[in-house]
Image (cartoon, rainbow, N blue to C red):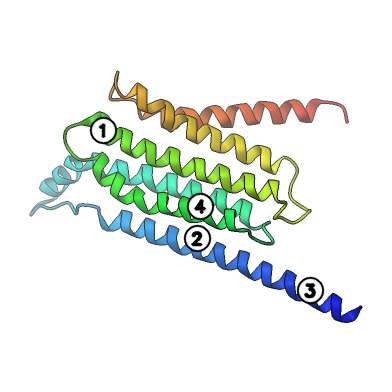
Amino acid sequence: MTLQQDESDSELMVRAIAAERLTFFSDAVIAIALTLLALNLTLPSGATNGEMLHSFLANRDEYLAFLISFMVIAAHWRGHHLIFRYVTHLDGHLVGFTIAWLFAQVIVPFATRLLTANGAFQFRFGFYSVVEVMAFAFFVLMVREIQRKHLYRDNVPPNMFLHTYLRLLGFGAGFALSIPVSFFTDYSYICWIAGPLAFRVYWLVTKRQRATQPA
């Protein structure tokens, strides 16, 4: 009986280590993506303060795109961190979805450079948006696999999976909607803000409603 218990404990430890290694690997890839994002920034130039400021303002679209991409990648990492700290073991599908999600993350620096290029706005904007829709779709598949196969500890916070799904839906819908909108206006990036904002408002309203309901 003791031998069986030791083997069971050993198997659980191996699974936990595998999940931890995947988390560390994901953190490293995210760090690389953020580094590549920063390395692509154009340095402002000029012999005087005025020339330097003028050069900085001339590249403001590039710096804004960097800020947006940094915040989006950071949102991915935060969501991944919130979920994977409860993951106890892996399966082949979860590993595959995670690798695909990381693939989308390392494309973001390239998509950011393309976004700030000249000409063919709809193509450039659409490419960036498709990369993000793909990333959030793989994230949904990751979460679904974790929930469906019960690859997590039993003490997860209430509504954690619901909150995650709605959050991903808000981000993904914002990027998806911005693609057709880009054919009518150059301000289609506002959808990138409207999607997460709509999720946030909805979640706060429903949370307040649940709090006011009698137990």
Q: Secondary structure at mark 4?
A: helix
Measured as percent of width and height from the top left, residue 178 is found at 38, 27
Measured as percent of width and height from the top left, residue 12 is found at 74, 69
Crowding at mark 3 (Cα within 10 Å: few <14, some 14-19, many 20+): few
Q: Residue placed farthest to the left in the image?
A: 47
Callout 4, which amino acid?
Trp
Residue holding disc 1: 123
Q: Secondary structure at mark 3?
A: helix
Callout 1, which amino acid?
Phe
- The answer to whether 196 is drawn above or below residue 109 in the figure is above
Point out the tag, 4 or 1, that comes first from the N-terminus: 4
Please state if 96 lies on the left or on the right of 36 as rendered. Answer: right
Q: Looking at the rendered structure, which numbered label has been put on residue 214?
A: none
Point out the tag, 1 or 2, that comes first from the N-terminus: 2
Residue holding disc 3: 9
- Nearest to the eye among marks 4 and 2: give it: 2
Residue holding disc 2: 26
The residues tagged by marks 4 and 3 sit, at their Cα atoms, a distance apart of 30 Å
| C-beta proximity under 8 Å, tags 2 and 3 | no
Q: Secondary structure at mark 2?
A: helix
For this rendering, which residue is in front, 23 or 53? 23
The residues tagged by marks 1 and 2 sit, at their Cα atoms, a distance apart of 29 Å
Circle count = 4
Callout 2, which amino acid?
Ser
Crowding at mark 2 (Cα within 10 Å: few <14, some 14-19, many 20+): many
- Nearest to the eye among marks 2 and 3: give it: 3
Q: Residue placed farthest to the front in the image?
A: 92
Q: Looking at the rendered structure, which numbered label has been put on residue 77?
A: 4
